[in-house]
Image: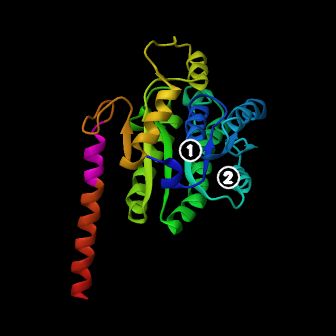
């Protein structure tokens, strides 16, 4: 698959300075896609941009704290009038690492802003252009925590569950406009952010984690086959979810067809 031909000349990646975000950036640059890289820390972001430019593509950066109100507007401004055909919402690790009642509500509001409010606003802006052009792709990098509440991950799991349903609904809506949407639902991935989260909660670093490079390569390959991909499992295998991506896809399509049939019957009665 030629990414630039299928989706467009520019990709925007949030959480781009390290881990899976940086891996996506390298993979896309290798395929000739220009990049808009967004992350909070300016130093690592600038260093990555220099590496990317050596591959012969254009690269611009924006240092934005996505957990703050107004962050989406800064991301949109950084893109300007560039044709963003691929959006990878990669930011959204558990930045708190605590039981719900052990932290002030402000910490949880920031996590909701990061994982939900900023993401929804950014997607809303760029998906409109994709819909109008009849091409584009959106990857929402999620977590297996989306499938159920976990002790110590209340707000994180809740926000990822929102993104799961949001991404599936987007896929249902935008597939009729030739726009691909994928919930890339990860298990344990060896990234700096995940290691920091484990250290915060006092957990050991497990063996056998996926690499950031594997995640980026697989995510781009699975994007045309949304709405969901459970890391390390075939399309018809539930894995760590309650049901498989194939089953969830079939359910979405079935409900859409039922709704269309109901609307047709209602219109005929009128």
List x then y, in percent, for residue 94. Answer: 57, 31
Q: Mark 2 points at which residue?
A: 72
N-terminal-most mark, 2 or 1: 2
- Going 64% across and 29% down the picture, which residue do you hit? 18
The vertical placement of 267 against 61, above or below, is below
Residue farthest to the bottom, as pictured? 270
Color theme of the render: rainbow
Distance from Cα at disc 2 to Cα at disc 1: 12 Å
Q: Which of 181 and 7 is in front in this view?
A: 7
List x then y, in percent, for residue 120. Answer: 56, 53
Q: Is mark 1 on a helix, strand or loop?
A: strand
List x then y, in percent, for residue 39. Answer: 69, 38
List x then y, in percent, for residue 117. Answer: 60, 50
Residue 212, visible in the rendered structure = yes
Q: What element carries label 2?
A: helix
Residue 226, visible in the rendered structure = no
**Are the residues tagged 2 and 1 within 8 Å (C-beta)?**
no
The vertical placement of 25 against 77, above or below, is above
The number of callouts visible is 2
Report the disc number at residue 166.
none
Which callout, 2 or 1, points to the residue nearer the camera? 1
Rendered image quadrant of residue 150? top left
Q: Name the residue under label 1.
A: 89
- Going 43% across and 44% down the picture, which residue do you hit? 183
- Going 43% across and 27% down the picture, which residue do you hit? 187
Query: What is the span of residues highlighted in magenta in the rendered image?
Result: 242-251
Say whether residue 32 is left or right of residue 46: left
- 10 Å neighbourhood of mark 1: few (<14), some, or many (≥20)? many
- 10 Å neighbourhood of mark 2: few (<14), some, or many (≥20)? many
Q: Which of 234 and 161 is in front in this view?
A: 234
């Amino acid at each position: 698959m030629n990414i630039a031909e299928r989706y467009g000349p520019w990709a925007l990646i949030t959480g781009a300075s390290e881990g899976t975000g940086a891996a996506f950036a390298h993979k896309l640059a290798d395929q000739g896609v220009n990049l808009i890289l967004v992350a909070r820390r300016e130093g690592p972001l600038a260093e990555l941009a220099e590496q990317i430019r050596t591959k012969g593509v254009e690269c611009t950066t924006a240092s934005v704290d996505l957990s703050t109100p107004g962050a989406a507007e800064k991301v949109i401004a950084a893109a300007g009038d560039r044709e963003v055909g691929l959006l990878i919402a990669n930011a959204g690790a558990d930045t708190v690492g605590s039981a719900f009642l052990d932290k002030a509500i402000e910490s949880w509001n920031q996590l909701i802003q990061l994982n939900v409010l900023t993401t929804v606003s950014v997607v809303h802006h760029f998906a409109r252009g994709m819909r109008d052009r009849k091409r584009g792709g959106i990857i929402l990098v999620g977590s297996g925590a989306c499938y159920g509440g976990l002790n110590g991950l209340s707000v994180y799991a809740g926000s990822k569950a929102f993104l799961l349903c949001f991404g599936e609904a987007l896929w249902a809506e935008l597939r009729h406009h030739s726009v691909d949407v994928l919930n890339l639902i990860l298990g344990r991935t060896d990234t700096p952010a995940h290691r920091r989260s484990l250290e915060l909660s006092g957990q050991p670093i497990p063996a056998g984690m996926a690499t950031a490079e594997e995640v980026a390569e697989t995510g781009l390959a699975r994007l045309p086959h949304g709405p969901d991909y459970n890391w390390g499992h075939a399309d018809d295998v539930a894995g760590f979810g309650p049901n498989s991506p194939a089953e969830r896809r079939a359910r979405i399509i079935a409900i859409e067809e039922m709704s269309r049939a109901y609307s047709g019957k209602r219109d005929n009665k009128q």
